[in-house]
């Protein structure tokens, strides 16, 4: 990871990693909870069962988002890419990784994996049968994550500089 400028600023790299994962977890948890009526049996399930299932799904989502961020960092050779001007190729990799993983996982989970089923309310892609809401999740939330993390991380950097002058 030395080529990603991490070795020169390990504390900043760790803070950014925690922000990416933590903000992702927060955003995805609320999205997962909002999708409950679109999955078979979830609207009728006990509250804590739904919370537990959504938490487990969110752990996977946060890991996918972190992996997508890491892939974009490897492409740009800059761990801190989110705090700078975004190149189209970096942003495209970041968005596509989450989308591709989602399409593959949803296809498996609603098919051979039998992990979950969509309710009749879920709009689906005709070709793969993938739910539109899980796909939208990986367009909307990564952008919110990138903007939120950028804002938080740049704020953290400013606060660190101010601490050095005290």
Image (cartoon, rainbow, N blue to C red):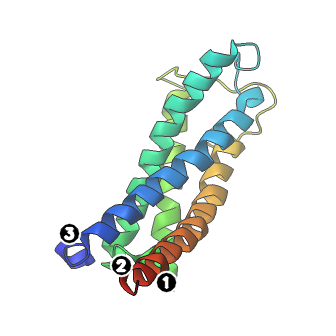
Q: CA distance from mark 2 to mark 3?
A: 12 Å
* Contact flag, marks 2 and 1 (Cβ < 8 Å): yes
Rendered location of residue 15, percent (x, y): 38, 63
Is 164 left or right of 122, judged from the image as shown?
left
Camera-nearest residue between 24 and 42: 24
Rendered location of residue 127, percent (x, y): 64, 43
In the picture of the structure, the residue carrying the numbered disc 1 is 87
Of labels 2 and 1, earlier in sequence is: 2
Q: Secondary structure at mark 1?
A: loop
Where on the picture, by quarter, is residue 119? top right
In the picture of the structure, the residue carrying the numbered disc 2 is 76
- Whether residue 158 is visible here, answered yes or no, is yes
Task: Look at the picture and state if 29 lies above or below 81.
Answer: above
Q: Residue at x 61, y 49 (%)?
A: 27
- Whether residue 125 is visible here, answered yes or no, is no
Where on the picture, by quarter, is residue 134? top right
- Badge 1: few (under 14), some or many (20 or more) residues near its Cα, within 10 Å? few
Rendered location of residue 81, percent (x, y): 42, 77
Q: Secondary structure at mark 2?
A: helix
Camera-nearest residue between 118 and 141: 141
- Badge 2: few (under 14), some or many (20 or more) residues near its Cα, within 10 Å? some
Residue most toward the right?
121
Q: Secondary structure at mark 3?
A: loop
Q: Residue at x 61, y 16 (%)?
A: 49
Camera-nearest residue between 109 and 80: 80
Q: CA distance from mark 2 to mark 1?
A: 8 Å
């Amino acid at each position: 990871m030395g080529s990603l400028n991490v070795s020169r600023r390990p504390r900043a790299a760790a803070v950014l990693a925690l922000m990416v994962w933590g903000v992702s977890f927060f955003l995805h948890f609320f999205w997962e909870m909002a999708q409950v009526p679109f999955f078979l049996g979830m609207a009728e399930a006990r509250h804590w069962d739904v919370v537990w299932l959504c938490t487990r799904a969110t752990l996977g989502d946060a890991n996918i988002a972190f992996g997508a961020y890491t892939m974009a960092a490897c492409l740009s050779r800059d761990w801190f890419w989110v705090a700078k001007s975004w190149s189209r190729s970096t942003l495209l990799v970041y968005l596509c990784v989450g989308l591709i993983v989602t399409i593959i996982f949803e296809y498996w989970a609603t098919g051979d994996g039998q992990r979950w089923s969509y309710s009749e309310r879920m709009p689906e892609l005709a070709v793969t049968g993938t739910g539109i809401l899980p796909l939208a999740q990986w367009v909307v939330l990564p952008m919110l994550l990138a903007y939120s993390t950028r804002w938080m991380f740049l704020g953290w950097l400013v606060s660190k500089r101010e601490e050095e002058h005290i």
